[in-house]
Every structure is written in C-alpha cells, then in structure tokens.
Amino acid sequence: MTGGKLIVFSAPSGSGKTTIVRHLLQQEELNLEFSISATSRIPRGEEIDGTDYYFINLKDFKQHIKNDDFLEWEEVYRDNFYGTLKTEIDRIWAMGKNVIFDIDVVGGLRIKKKYPNKTLAVFVKPPSVDELKIRLKKRKTESEEKINMRIAKASVELATAPQFDHIIENKILEVALEESKDLVLQFIAEGHA
Ligand code: 5GP
C-alpha cells in the first residue's frame, strides 16, 4: 500500500483533540485531509453528515463490519459504533494528501500497529479528570448520564498513553497547538516509509 502518512490524534472525550485536529487541518504546509469516520450515533449540535461523520444506522454499520469494509472499528460506547472505512483512506491518498484521524485510543493504536512506519500516533492528555468533567459539562451537548459514561472511560484511556509515540498535555491550548504542529511537520518531513 502506498500513499501519504497517517497522523492519529487520540484522547479521552473532552481533552481538546478535536480543536487541535481542526487547527492542524488549517495549516496548508501539512497537506492534511480529515478522515471522516462512520458512526452509528445520532448527529450532535451542528454536525453535518459527510463532513463530521458519515452517520449510518446500526444495521448498516454491522453490515459494513461483516463485509470487512473497515480499517478499524470500535464500539466506543454501548451501541455507539465508530469506524474508519478503508475507502476513506483510499479517497485521501488518491488526493495525494496525508490522513489525520480524530479517533479513540483503541482505534488509534490499531492503525499504528497496522502501519507502524507510516503512522504518527499522538495522545492528547487533559490536565486532570476533574478538568475533563468541567469541559464536558461546558460543552452542553450531552446528558449527565452520557457525560458520566465518558468520564468513566477516560481513566481507562489515560492508561494507554505510554503506548503512543508522543503525549501532548493540553493545559494551555496555544502551547498544545504549536507543539502538535511541530510534531506533525517533523514527521511529514522525514523520509518516506
Ligand atoms: P464523539 O461521539 O465525541 O464524536 O466521539 C467519541 C469517541 O469516538 C471519540 O474519542 C472519537 O475520537 C472516537 N472516534 C471517532 N471516530 C472514530 C473511529 O473511526 N474509530 C474509532 N475507533 N474511534 C472513533
């Protein structure tokens, strides 16, 4: 398989990784294109189908699993499936671009394992679990129950951080943004794998 590089950003929900990924996408010299995941969860807020996610129903998602259409997939929360379609990577590589992923830790590590030399796996660490709770509440997009579900998962996810190539602590956003950009720039500049 040829094509550009794979840049994975993984983190507990609310760590700010989506903000970082969006920032990186605006940096033209990085030549990045966002990997749009498929999910069985319903759209939140202003999310757009085909831009933020491919929103598909649970039945169709399971059919894609059966067809082996996914590079990786995960039941991130109960009945909320998320996955990267193989066609998504082909689409981006055909554009001559590098792929950037905003995915959960299990999926992120799976991609790293599949393409060890092509992948830069970055873990975004929130300053603390308490801070995470505050951020999720501020977001006001999920119910109390859903927030608690995400917090419970965060502790498990934090334990996987050492398996990533780099850990970025998102304490001061501007610093995290700059650090992320430098990391990606350096990785992309390295010789082809
Ligand atoms: P959210 O519901 O907040 O958009 O996403 C929940 C979690 O699922 C986040 O950690 C997000 O990064 C992760 N996620 C999104 N897309 C994928 C994917 O394609 N595969 C995996 N494994 N996780 C994903």
Image (cartoon, rainbow, N blue to C red):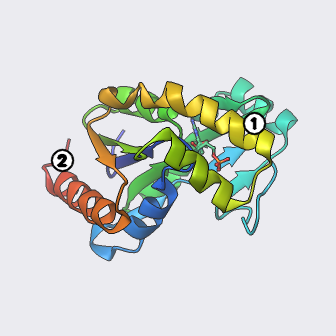
Label 1 residue SS:
strand
Residue located 38% across and 63% down the image: 32
Q: What residue type is labelled 2?
A: His
Q: Disc 2 to disc 1, how far (Cα)?
A: 36 Å
Residue located 47% across and 57% down the image: 92
Q: Which quadrant would residue 112 be assigned to in this image?
A: top left
From the viewer's side, name the closer residue of 104 and 49.
104
From the viewer's side, name the closer residue of 129 and 121.
129
Residue located 41% across and 26% down the image: 160
Looking at the rendered image, the quarter that the C terminus falls into is top left
Residue 8, placed above or below residue 65 = below
Q: Does the residue labelled 2 lie within 8 Å of ligand 1?
A: no
Tell me: 193 left or right of 39: left
- Is residue 7 visible in the rendered image? The answer is yes
From the viewer's side, name the closer residue of 143 and 166.
143
Q: Quadrant of ligand 1?
A: top right
**Mark 2 or 1, nearer chain start:** 1
Tell me: 185 left or right of 103: left
Q: Residue 136 carries which label?
A: none
The residue carrying mark 2 is 192
Q: What residue type is labelled 1?
A: Asn
Rendering coords of residue 29 (x, y %): 27, 72
The residue carrying mark 1 is 80
Rendering coords of residue 183 (x, y %): 22, 54
Residue 111, placed above or below residue 93 = above
Q: Does the residue labelled 1 lie within 8 Å of ligand 1?
A: yes
Rendering coords of residue 124 (x, y %): 39, 46
